[in-house]
Amino acid sequence: MAKWAFITNHGLVLGHIARNPRSTARVIAQAVGITERTTHKIIAELEEAGYISRKKVGRKNQYQINPNLPLRHPSHDEVMVGELLQILARKKADPAKEQMKLPISIP
């Protein structure tokens, strides 16, 4: 059975960079579960699209995210990437203290 996830590798890389702007591609790849080569490709695509910029600090890169760009899918182009990153950065809720409330009713 194939694995799938709600967030693409691009979103996972961007989320990791948002939390750790000085991470190396190797560390990002390990955290996301993809190859270092794929990570370099994703970083280059994110940079080309303007979602991140990088500057050299010594021998390493430091990344900065542009939170004011919209998500790329036409059905969500009114949502800014910074909003998604805020959601991804949230800490896990303590289930004993808080129950998730859905804005829908289930019969």
Image: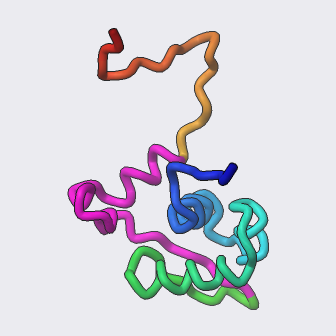
Up-down: is 46 above or below 102?
below
- Residue ID at (31%, 58%): 80
Q: In which quarter of the view is residue 13 placed?
A: bottom right
Q: Is residue 73 magenta?
A: yes
Visible residue check, residue 68: no
Give the quadrant of the C terminus.
top left
Q: How many marks?
A: 0
Up-down: is 36 above or below 87?
below
* Coordinates of residue 1 in the picture (x, y in percent): 69, 49
**Residue in the foreground of this view, choosing between 33 and 44:** 33
Q: Seen in the image, is 55 located left or right of residue 31?
A: left
Farthest residue, direction front = 1
Visible residue check, residue 61: yes
Q: In which quarter of the view is residue 12 placed?
A: bottom right
* Coordinates of residue 20 in the picture (x, y in percent): 65, 62
* Coordinates of residue 61 in the picture (x, y in percent): 65, 83
* Coordinates of residue 25 in the picture (x, y in percent): 71, 77
Q: In which quarter of the view is residue 33 placed?
A: bottom right
The coloring applied to the image is: rainbow
Q: Seen in the image, is 74 located left or right of residue 29?
A: left
Give the extent of the magenta segment: 60-88
